[in-house]
Amino acid sequence: MPLILDALCQSEADAPVLRLVEALGGEPARVKERLVGEPAYHSRRLQFASGAEVILHDDAVVAAMLHAAPTEFAAHGFDLPEWIPGIDDGATLEDLKKAIDAPRYLTGMGFTLDGAYAVPNFKNNRGWNQPGNLLSITLTVEVPGRSCRPEDDDCPVCSDLLVRKEDSDGGQNGGAGGVDVERTIPALSSATSAGLLKESPHWVPLADLQLLHASGLMERAESQLTCTACRRIVCLTLFRASAPTFVYAVMDEARRRPLEKIPPAEQWGDAPRLAEDREAMHYVDHHPGAWFLVEQQGDLFLQARYWRNSMVDSEVLLRLEPDELAAYRSEGKDFLSGLAQRIDKSRPSTEESPYFHRDLYRGPDSAALTKSFATAIVNHTWIAEQRRRT
Ligand SMILES: [Zn+2]
């Protein structure tokens, strides 16, 4: 293990890396290279027949992976006992704790070494208590969970969705001419339709990104989509005054990215988008932590938060009835706050509650309603407030 730790952060030509490569078997069985994201970094992956991999970003070693199981480039798993005494391919998390004998990293799975982390990967991300589920151990300088895992650079689902522009020197630069927005958006959108990516409702809908950007109303218009395979979040951002970016982020990084209010479609939509907007839900009002009021084609809908128990909260979505509408028109917000309290007290997740059967989230259109509702309140959620502050 010290051989690996010494090589981390060093360049491929540096002595510690040469020593490590030699110890892993010399010439790699396979080398994979690609540009990741835009602005791009160069990812180079040396895969050895011994079952180990070394990953470099812009010529600095960021991770080494030791595969316990056979892989495409190695017929046998890596000789773990030789490198980490006490560990073999049957090791459980408990065995690793004993053998590595280092403080656990706070999110649970990894170990904190001197300036680096050791992160075991188990089959389907579980099964760490049974022998035979250990897939690999990654030694990395990246803090687990704080940034994308270097081994996801090649994710088969999401690593080829960025389409790059042909650069002016005819591809000499490996196509590093920036994001080809016209072709990247359809690539992301078809991966979303195929269920491979999941679009976040808290950002600009991918379908609106170019229109919003063209309007010049937003300094930066950003869509975020999560890969269902590697969980990286693709952040595609179109800036008013600079080149577009395509960045992979983990959840924590993604939600800290800034986004100003998304202007209403009437200010930037084309005819089809405006027609769609006439049928969509629109934000009317809200009381933080308690309720949201939205309007759709003359009807008003209240989403009220309630507590299932002291730990778990949930929401109901009701169409206001004529007497409730009248009360709201005369009493205003106070009526809605009172109504939200009555809903909470009635325990609306139980059939005894008069609101149980009115809850549209229990109906057949639940998924579509959840999505249109999320789009309607995008500028007013707690998350939106937070990211405007950054
Ligand atoms: Zn992925």
Image: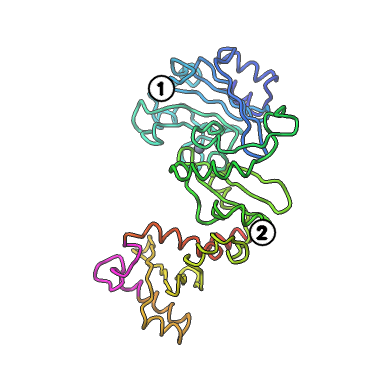
Span highlighted in magenta in the image: 343-363
Q: Check if residue 136 falls in the magenta segment.
A: no
Quarter of the image for residue 340 reads bottom left
Q: Earlier in the sequence, mark 1 or mark 2?
A: 1
Q: Residue furthest right?
A: 169
Disc 1 to disc 2, C-alpha distance: 57 Å
Q: Residues within 10 Å of mark 2 (few under 14, many from 20)?
A: few
Residue beneath the point at 60% across and 32% down: 114
For the N terminus, the quadrant is: top right
Quarter of the image for residue 205 reads bottom right
Which is nearer the eye, 8 or 339? 339
Q: Residue furthest front?
A: 271
What amino acid type is highlighted by mark number 2?
Answer: Ser
- Which mark is drawn over residue 215? 2
1 and 2 marks in contact (CB < 8 Å):
no
In the picture shown, does residue 292 fall above or below 366? below
- Which mark is drawn over residue 172? none
- Which mark is drawn over residue 89? 1
What amino acid type is highlighted by mark number 1?
Answer: Asp
